[in-house]
Amino acid sequence: MTLPPVHHHTGLEASGGATRVARLLLQGLRRHGVEAELSFELAEKADGTAIPPEEFGVRLPEDVIAHVHCTGNWPALLGSIPTGVKTVVTLHDCELFTGGCPYPLDCPLGEDGCAAPCPRNFPDADGLRRRKLAEIQRLDPVLVAPSRWLARLAKTHLFRPVKIIPNGIPWPVGLRSKNDARKALGIHPAARVALFAAHGGMNAAYKSGDTWQDIWKRLKKALPDLVCFAVGGDREERHDDFILWPYVDRAKLALLMAASDALLYPTRADNHSLVVLEAMAAGLPVVAYGVGGVPEQIVDRLTGMLVPPGDRDQFVEAALSVLSSRSLVRQIGREAFLSGSRKFAVDRMVGDYARLYAGL
């Protein structure tokens, strides 16, 4: 199909979920001969294109589709785009329709707006929410959400339809050797290995980083041969068999996943996590709280284990049921790999967006 040029825009150049999806779309579109560019509000590399939110729209060339993924200032970014420009907005969290919360959690966000005063102390929270809504109404963009959960929320608060396009990642042809991965990391082949992973590590509030060590201690008591990786913090340390890794690149994370038996993901809020997809692509069972869009990624007891949100006792019990059975690790991991390859491969995501662009 013949498509117009597409300009993607995101906040930080660092590899967050929104930025990674934007990069994957850019690469996929270019493979299909579509002209595509990517800009950032904060570029970390000398050749990165940095565009402040208030300048994004005025720098757009004519006859281009503007595809926005995230920003540090939604009113300024949307306000910079002239009326009539074909615009796509992918919601990677809830911030487009809240007064500042990426995820409201227990915040009383109603259909009529934010609570006053804001329980989380965002200044002029409801005013900010209304300014974003006014720009959405003026610009009339196509809204996309990777999960049905977020699409329902966005539709309720933005008063318009939201298209659902699940995230996708490059899917390997086959699974890596667990023994080879463990040899590379110096882990005994017979050990049981659990993995926590989140940006911020044990300081990651939305990912229950403050509970990781307690969960680990309870699992270690029942499984003495258990080794645990905790990835994403700001330091590298080892406490007995609890091994802290700082933020690592995709290749290193893939190696850690290949060496592990399960991803433990006690997230308090989530949309359509790329970490969950990466675990599935590594043939790794995922134990997670059933929040947000996570149940749209994991089929309970088939491709992972879903636990009632916040129930730490059941989380530990579910993790033990997986980690104590090597045959269950292999069975669930294999099903996760095969199921994910059908649903969450990057080519499917790129094709879905290409059809959306063509419809514009």
Image: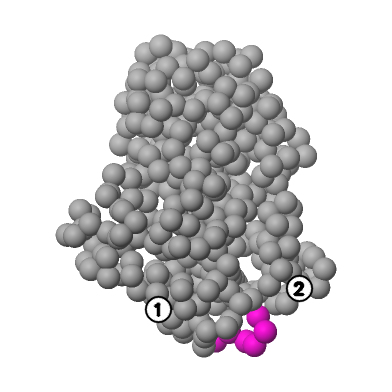
Q: Nearer the viewer, residue 344 or 82?
A: 82
Q: Secondary structure at mark 2?
A: loop
* Quarter where residue 326 is shown: top right
Distance of label 2 from label 1 (alpha carbons) = 28 Å
Task: Please report contact status of discs 2 and 1: CB closer than 8 Å, yes or no.
Answer: no
Point out residue 306 in the picture as x, y percentages from the top left corner.
Answer: 49, 28
For the residue marked with disc 1, what is the amino acid?
A: Ala
Q: Which residue is painted at 51% across and 53% down in the image?
A: 151
- Which residue in the structure is indicated by mark 2? 3
**Which is nearer the N-term, disc 2 or disc 1?**
2
Q: Tell me the amino acid under the disc marked 2.
A: Leu
Q: Quadrant of the N terminus?
A: bottom right
In the displayed structure, 157 sits above or below 200; it is below
Q: Which mark is residue 150?
A: none
Q: Position of residue 89 (x, y in %)?
A: 54, 66
* Residue to which mark 1 is pinned: 76
Task: Tell me the residue at 58%/81% (across/down).
Answer: 85
Element under disc 1: helix
Q: Which contiguous range is marked in magenta?
A: 59-64
Name the residue at 78% across, 64% down: 31
Q: Is residue 190 left or right of residue 315?
A: right
Question: Relative to 210, does residue 325 appear above or below in the rendering?
Answer: above
Q: Is-magenta flag for residue 298? A: no
